[in-house]
Image: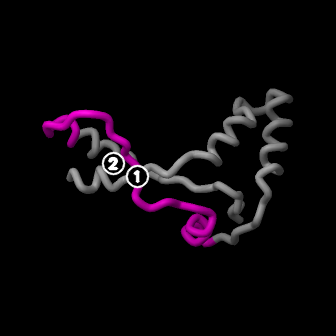
Amino acid sequence: MVPDLPGLHLQALHSRDAAEAYRLALVRDVRGPFSIAAEQVLDAASLAKLLGARRVGVPSWAPRAALAAAWRLHVVAATPQLFDLALGLPVTATSGVASSG
């Protein structure tokens, strides 16, 4: 089962791709900051398909409440605010990286 939370999305980046981006930045004459991210955005539907799992709708307050309780009991080191932050992360644009290759 994959939780289908509102705002759940991520961009996975393989370590080899990150290493290649770093290598290219070293050997080419480039300047400025770089945002390296996977082009495809993974959401609950794509994660469920990838894992051969079923999506289950979960309101975001439920895992946040569980995390808050675990945080207060010193069971986990992650605060509920970190959960909020994770659900609110923006998607990184990759068009600039692709066009500079």
Q: Quadrant of the N terminus?
A: bottom right
27 vs 77: above or below: below
Q: CA distance from mark 1 to mark 2?
A: 19 Å
Q: Which contiguous range is marked in magenta?
A: 24-52
Label 2 is placed on what type of residue? Arg
Q: Taking 68 as reference, is 85 left or right?
A: left
Query: How many labels sit on residues?
Result: 2
Q: Which residue is mark 2?
A: 16
Q: Taking 74 as reference, is 6 left or right?
A: left
| Image x and y of residue 83, in percent | 69, 41
Q: Residues within 10 Å of mark 2 (few under 14, many from 20)?
A: few
Label 1 is placed on what type of residue? Ala
Which residue is nearer to you in this view: 86 or 54? 86
| Image x and y of residue 101, in percent | 20, 53
Based on the picture, tell me whether residue 37 belongs to the magenta stretch: yes
Q: Which residue is mark 1?
A: 93
Based on the picture, tell me whether residue 1 belongs to the magenta stretch: no
Mark sitting earlier along the chain (1/2): 2
| Image x and y of residue 69, in percent | 86, 36
Q: Taking 40 as reference, is 34 left or right?
A: left
**Dot 2 lies on which element?**
helix
- Residue 76: image quadrant is top right
14 vs 19: above or below: below
- Residue 5: image quadrant is bottom right
Residue at x 54%, y 53% (from the top left corner): 10
